[in-house]
Image (tube, rainbow, N blue to C red):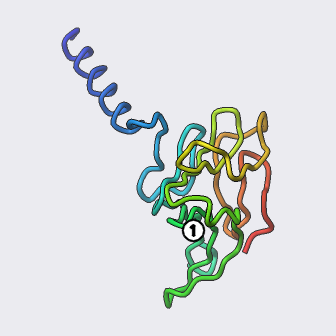
Amino acid sequence: MTRKLAAAVATAGLAVSALIGANGTASAAAGQSFLYRGEALHVGQMIYRFSPQGWQIQLVMQNDGNLVEYLRFDDGSRYVCWATNSWGSGNNNWAVYQTDGNFVVYNSSGGAVWASNTKGGGGSTVDMNANGVLYVGTKAINNGC
């Protein structure tokens, strides 16, 4: 019984280490519709959900440094709902929902280029509702799509 428990603990530790990675920030799981505190979106990653019409609402960390929320239609076209306007600030930016409740876009040098200013706020996720309203914790930071 003790060996099984030790093996399970070791396996869980390896899984957490793999998730956190070298930069110390967990990434969003594939297909996840939210970020927990401590999780990040790196270039090319997104969280998403579906609107009542079945269209996909996406929050995407783009390779131009901008974090953008899109409404993606069935034909593949997209409409920009909201953006951090941090394009041009670097091509290796990432967005992290920090453990203090602030959602921040950092450039490759570690400098903050945008922040939600939600430090100390309630809630535990960054997510969107079916109308595209983006929430950092319990605070809405846009008006939706």
Please give left or right for residue 128 compared with residue 110 in the image. right
Please give left or right for residue 115 compared with residue 14 in the image. right
Please give left or right for residue 70 compared with residue 116 in the image. left
Where is residue 26 drawn, in percent x and y? 47, 40
Give 56 or 41, whichever is nearer the viewer: 41
Establish if 66 lies above or below 121: below
Establish if 25 lies above or below 75: above
Please give left or right for residue 79 compared with residue 6 in the image. right
Give 112 or 73, whichever is nearer the viewer: 112
Where is residue 39 drawn, in percent x and y? 53, 43
Which three-letter amino acid code belongs to the residue tagged 1? Gln
**Looking at the image, which residue is at 52% across and 53% down?**
41
Give the position of the C terminus as an image quadrant: bottom right
**Pointer 1 residue:** 58
Establish if 132 lies above or below 37: below
**Looking at the image, which residue is at 75% across and 69% down?**
144
